[in-house]
Image (cartoon, rainbow, N blue to C red):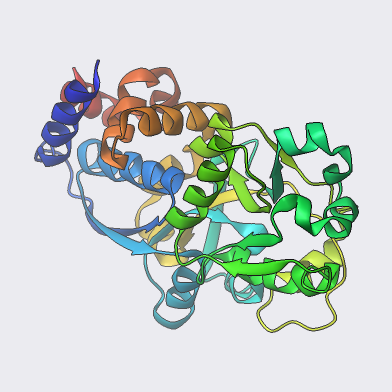
Amino acid sequence: MNKLAYTSAALALFAAPALAQEECGQVSITEMNWASASVVTNVASFIMQQGYGCEVQVVPSDTVPAITSLVENGEPDIVTELWTNSTGEAYRKLVEEGRVQELGDVLQPGGVEGWWVPAYLVEEHPELKTIDGVLANPELVGGMFHNCPEGWGCRITNDNLIPAFGVEESGLEVFNHGSGETLATSMASAFENEEPWFGYYWAPTALLGSYDMVSVDMGPYNEAEHKKATQKDATDVGKTSYPAAPVKTAVVSTFAEEHPDLTEFLATMTFPTDVMNSVLGWMDENSASAEEGAVYFLTTYQDIWTEWLNDSATENLQAVLQ
């Protein structure tokens, strides 16, 4: 299928009324404002509508606002692509109190976070492989650290790690991006012009699939220091690298009790990270929307998503997709 075909399919499939089946009722699900999360939400929303007969309310959000809403309002029902190593104490308390249930890994083997430089810089200056080498040579990376937007969990973590490593003391300016789009554009523009760049990024993303970036060695991972770094307004945070990131789907406990079939589906909804990179790469190459990316996934990787569903939901979806 070409881009036009996927666009037509997306319009038809997402506008189609759910097949007659047992009523699921209204459910709410986050759509975090980065590409892979949008794909996950669109796939999950389509499956819940067409496979389980749900009326789905999609809630645009970020990590911190989503957790705040769970704490204050007990909603939305479903929070997906939750990078739990950057969620802070408020989220952990929700799980410990039993108000939220953490389900399966939505990405397998998980997410990759870190501070990155372009491979062409490392080829010319091997010392940039390590954080000590970067901090000793700020001019080689453009004199700037590209930080996450406000509202992202990584912004809190980075804001605590920046003083721990002495980033600004080394002469690097910290530039706080206003959106994920400007952060991505800064990397892409630098890479295409073979200019210096240093900053935070993560995978799965089309960007790291498209550009050869090197993860800067930030030294050993320290669990205690990283836990502190994820907390807003933390003090005395020490040096640590980013760990491999578990990326989960979580649901409100009352939702899990009322919707066991949906909870079972969400617990088994796992996208291989390399497959998600392929979907995001296709979207980037074709300037495709998240809905179109969801249709690309649903039509290309039926062997994956059919394993997530019960027999009834599988039959319903195959009837729509055939």
Q: Quadrant of residue 30?
A: bottom left
The reply, left or right, for residue 233 in relation to residue 37 is: right
Image spot of residue 2 (x, y percent): 24, 18
Q: Is residue 23 above or below residue 29?
A: above
Q: Quadrant of residue 52?
A: top left
The reply, left or right, for residue 310 in relation to residue 89 is: left
Nearest the viewer among 291 and 54 is: 291
- Can residue 279 be seen from the camera position used here? yes
The reply, left or right, for residue 53 in relation to residue 16 is: right
Image spot of residue 239 (x, y percent): 87, 65
- Can residue 87 be seen from the camera position used here? no
- Residue at the (68%, 52%) spot, across then down: 198
Q: Is residue 1 above or below residue 261?
A: above
- Residue at the (81%, 34%) spot, across then down: 124
- Residue at the (89%, 43%) spot, across then down: 127
Q: Is residue 4 above or below residue 22?
A: above
Nearest the viewer among 236 and 253 is: 236
Q: Is residue 146 above or below residue 21?
A: below
Quadrant assignment for the N terminus: top left
Image spot of residue 67 (x, y percent): 50, 71
Image spot of residue 22 (x, y percent): 18, 44
The reply, left or right, for residue 27 in relation to residue 139 is: left
Quadrant assignment for the C terminus: top left
Q: Quadrant of residue 47?
A: top left
Q: How many marks?
A: 0
Nearest the viewer among 245 and 207 is: 207
